[in-house]
Image (cartoon, rainbow, N blue to C red):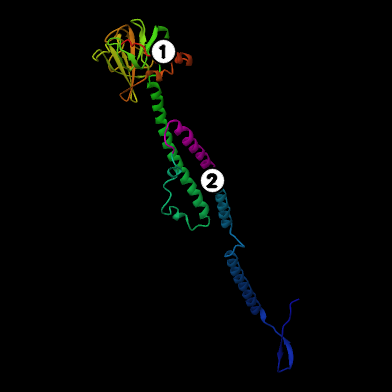
Amino acid sequence: MAKVKYFYDPETLSYRPIDGGKTLKVSNFFLFLISSLLFGVFTLFGLLSTDFLNTPKELLLERELNNYEFQFELLSQRLQQMENVMENIENRDNEIYRNYFEANPIPQEQRRAGFGGVNRYKNLEGFGNSDQIIATTKKIDILSRMLVVQSNSLDEIQALAEKKEELLAAIPTIQPIKKEDLKRMASGYGWRTDPFTKKRRKHYGMDFSAKTGTPVYATGDGIVKRADNRSSGYGRHIRIDHGFGYVSLYAHLSKYNVKRGQKVKRGEIIGYVGNTGRSVAPHLHYEIFKDKNKINPLNFYIDSMSPAEFDAIVNQASEENQSLD
């Protein structure tokens, strides 16, 4: 039941009911409706400006942002794992690979150089998650630098390995005459009696006594630089340039099996034992040069004899006897 409102009538000195009519009721209703609408609108704007209420789009963006942050965290962890793997590779590179090939290790300052000075991450500042983005970007930059330096190092190691393999193939490391073809190791490197003057003089090679026509083998890979008899005392002889400062000489040959400029491999027949030049009997005079200095060939027989055989030839070579040339 609707409430009845009254007013005091001074003429009748009594209270009489107020009759507003339909117009007043309708106006009051619309006034209430407009007031309620305005209140609702202002309340909605107030709530939207706070964190208590988000629109569906904002909720979607928030979920995407949380997902990106989670993905960033996963990426950061994976980058850390990759950085740890790279550090392990760097350690092996410095301590094993570069050490084996006699190369200087790469310092850590060089592996991570180029990140000082100006702030290269200034454009990433000022965001809500700037710290996370900058930290991840730094890890990517460091890892990129590590990969570049390590790649260059591996290229260098590969080149050194190829040179090392080439060096090992070039060094004269076998006996120039097979053991079964030898009569004896007639004379070694050092002071010996000259067969012609009977005086002591320095013998700069090793004499291998063998029959005329016995095959002579290249002791390492190289290029034939000389195959002639135009050097005093050597008679028919061959000189092979092995590279890396090594040259081997084979003298008093009966004939050649190679010619000047020819490439030869270790173990290839290059000539045959003879008695040409300043020689008193068929034999091979063998010398090795390193950087143009004559050195003892005995130090290079590592591929052609057992330890016992090597000891025996050392004992024979140390005897101060008469040389054959």
- Looking at the image, the residue that sits furthest to the front is 199
Task: Specify start and end residues of the magenta stretch as a single range.
Answer: 76-105
**Type of the residue with mark 1:** Gln
Determine the main secondary structure of the stretch shown in magenta: helix
Query: In the figure, residue 122 lies in which quadrant?
Result: bottom left
Q: Is residue 56 above or below residue 167?
A: below
Callout 1 touching callout 2 (CB < 8 Å) = no
Q: Is residue 90 above or below residue 169?
A: below
Percent across and percent down for residue 282 are 32, 6
Percent across and percent down for residue 228 are 25, 13
Q: Residues within 10 Å of mark 1 (few under 14, many from 20)?
A: some
Instruction: Tell me the quadrant of the picture where the N terminus can be found.
Output: bottom right
Query: In the figure, residue 272 lies in which quadrant?
Result: top left
Residue labelled with disc 1: 316
Residue labelled with disc 2: 75
- Looking at the image, the residue that sits furthest to the right is 1
**Type of the residue with mark 2:** Leu
| Element at label 1 | helix
261 is within the stretch colored magenta: no
Residue nearest the viewer, comparing 218 with 196: 196
Q: Residues within 10 Å of mark 2 (few under 14, many from 20)?
A: some
102 is within the stretch colored magenta: yes
Instruction: Tell me the quadrant of the picture where the C terminus can be found.
Output: top left
Percent across and percent down for residue 217 are 36, 13
Query: In the figure, residue 6 lies in which quadrant?
Result: bottom right
